[in-house]
C-alpha cells in the first residue's frame, strides 16, 4: 500500500484465509464489515495494515492511502483510499448509544451543498440512506464543471464512519470492487474515553509515513 500525506483542504475484514466459521459478525448493514475493534482483533505487529489510530486499514498494492492533514495542528483529519477507478474518503466520529448520528447529519450536508451552489438527493445505499451530491468545481486550468459523489453514514457501537465515494464507486457501487472490499475490512477503534456525539475520532500518522510532493 502506497502512503502519501496530503495537505488539508481549505474547507472544513478478516483475512480471506480465515475459515467461514471463525468470521466475525456485526449487526444490520455491517454484517460483512466495516468492523468494530470488539468484533475483529488487529494484531499490533500486523504489517498488512496501516494503524491510523481510530482506523485500521488493510493494504493492497493497487490502493493508495492518502492522509488529509491540517498543516497548522498537524492533526490527521481524514483518510483517502485511491484506486484506478475512484476514491473513498473516510472520517470517523463519536456517536452516543442508540443514537443515529447520520440522520442528524444528512440535512446539514444538504444545506451545505446548497450553500455552495450544489445539490443533494437522498438515495438508498448499501448501508441505508445515502446522499448523492453534485457540486461545482474548477479545475487547475480554470475550467468549470461538476463533481458527483455519494456520501454514506455507517453506524457502529458508539461511532459513525462517514464515507464519501468518488468515481466508479459513486456511479456504480460494486460489492466486489477493490475499494468496496477495502472498506469492508476497515476496523474502527472508538476508545473508552467520553466524547460528545459528532466529535471526530483521533487519527494519527502511521509509523514511517513521509510527505510526498
Image (cartoon, rainbow, N blue to C red):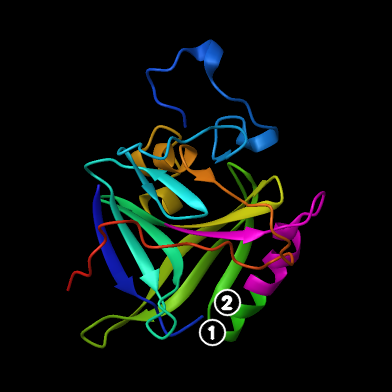
Residue to which mark 2 is pinned = 113
Return the x and y of residue 142 as percentages of the image width and height: 26, 88
Query: Where is residue 63 shown, x and y percent of the image?
Result: 28, 47
Q: Secondary structure at mark 1?
A: loop
* Secondary structure at numbered mark 2: helix
Marks 1 & 2, CB-CB < 8 Å contact: yes
Q: Is residue 91 above or below residue 145?
A: above
Residue sitting at 47 percent across and 32 percent down?
A: 13
Q: Is residue 64 magenta?
A: no
Residues 179 and 8: in front is: 8
Image side of residue 126 versus residue 194, left or right: left
In-image side of 78 versus 162 (left or right):
left
Question: Residue 16: which disc?
Answer: none
* Quarter of the figure with the C terminus: bottom left
Q: Which mark is residue 116?
A: 1
- Position of 63 relative to 181 (above/below): below
- Residue range in magenta is 89-109
Q: Nearer the viewer, residue 198 or 54?
A: 54
Amino acid at each position: 500500500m502506497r502512503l502519501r500525506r496530503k495537505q488539508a483542504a481549505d474547507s472544513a475484514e478478516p483475512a480471506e484465509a480465515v475459515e467461514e466459521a471463525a468470521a466475525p459478525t456485526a449487526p444490520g448493514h455491517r454484517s460483512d464489515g466495516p468492523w468494530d475493534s470488539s468484533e475483529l482483533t488487529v494484531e499490533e505487529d500486523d504489517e498488512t495494515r496501516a494503524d491510523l489510530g481510530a482506523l485500521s486499514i488493510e493494504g493492497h498494492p493497487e490502493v493508495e492511502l492518502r492522509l488529509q492533514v491540517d498543516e497548522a495542528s498537524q492533526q490527521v483529519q481524514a483518510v483517502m483510499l485511491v484506486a484506478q477507478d475512484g476514491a473513498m474518503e473516510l472520517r470517523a466520529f463519536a456517536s452516543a448509544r442508540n443514537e443515529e448520528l447520520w440522520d442528524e447529519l444528512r440535512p446539514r450536508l444538504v444545506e451545505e451543498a446548497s450553500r455552495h451552489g450544489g445539490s443533494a438527493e437522498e438515495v438508498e445505499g448499501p448501508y441505508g440512506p445515502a446522499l448523492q451530491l453534485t457540486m461545482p468545481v474548477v479545475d487547475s486550468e480554470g475550467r468549470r464543471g461538476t463533481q458527483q459523489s455519494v456520501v454514506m453514514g455507517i453506524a457502529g457501537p458508539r461511532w459513525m464512519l462517514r464515507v464519501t465515494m468518488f468515481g466508479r464507486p459513486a456511479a456504480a457501487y460494486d460489492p466486489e470492487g477493490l475499494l468496496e472490499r477495502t472498506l469492508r475490512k476497515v476496523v474502527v477503534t472508538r476508545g473508552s474515553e467520553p466524547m460528545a456525539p459528532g466529535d471526530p475520532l483521533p487519527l494519527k500518522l502511521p509509523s514511517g509515513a513521509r510527505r510526498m510532493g
